[in-house]
């Protein structure tokens, strides 16, 4: 099963967290599925509950991930 855990142990020195999620389609093979963004938001809620700041980044385009965005920015185009 891919995705994010629902909880994580972070060192005390970590105060800010950025989670990069894939922009998955909520439908796969005609069936609803839990997306990377949903899993990332669940983990982010857990992290915020520990008193830390946490943001979730999701690319604009369905099917894209953080690496697609990085590579597109290097090449001067939109991901």
Image (spheres, rainbow, N blue to C red):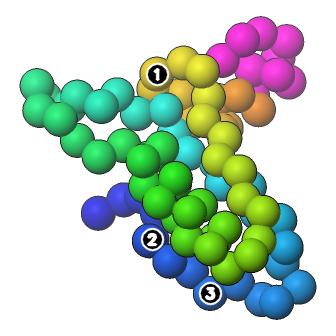
Could you tell me which residue is drawn at 82 percent across and 17 percent down?
A: 75
- Residue behind mark 1: 62
**In the image, is residue 77 above or below residue 18?**
above
How far apart, in angstroms, are the residues tagged by discs 3 and 1? 30 Å
- Residue behind mark 2: 5
Mark 2 and mark 3 in contact? Answer it, CB < 8 Å. no
How far apart, in angstroms, are the residues tagged by discs 1 and 2? 22 Å
Determine which quarter of the picture holds residue 19: bottom right
Determine which quarter of the picture holds residue 26: top left
Q: Nearer the viewer, residue 52 or 32?
A: 52
Magenta stretch holds residue 75: yes
- Residue behind mark 3: 9
Could you tell me which residue is drawn at 82 percent across and 89 percent down?
A: 12
- Residue 1 has which mark? none
SS label for mark 3:
loop
Q: Could you tell which of marks 1 and 2 lies nearer the N-terminus?
A: 2
The magenta segment is 71-79
- Looking at the picture, how far across and down is residue 14, in whole percent? 83, 78
User: Taking 19 as reference, is 22 left or right?
Assistant: left
- Looking at the picture, how far across and down is residue 60, in whole percent? 60, 21
Could you tell me which residue is drawn at 49 percent across and 32 percent down?
A: 23
Q: Could you tell which of marks 3 and 1 lies nearer the N-terminus?
A: 3
């Amino acid at each position: 099963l891919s995705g994010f855990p629902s909880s994580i142990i972070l060192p005390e020195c970590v105060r800010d967290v950025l989670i990069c999620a894939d922009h998955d389609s909520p439908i796969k093979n005609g069936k609803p599925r839990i997306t990377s963004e949903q899993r990332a938001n669940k983990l982010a809620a857990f992290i915020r509950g520990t008193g830390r700041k946490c943001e979730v980044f999701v690319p604009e385009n369905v099917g894209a991930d953080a690496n697609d965005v990085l590579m597109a920015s290097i090449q001067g185009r939109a991901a």
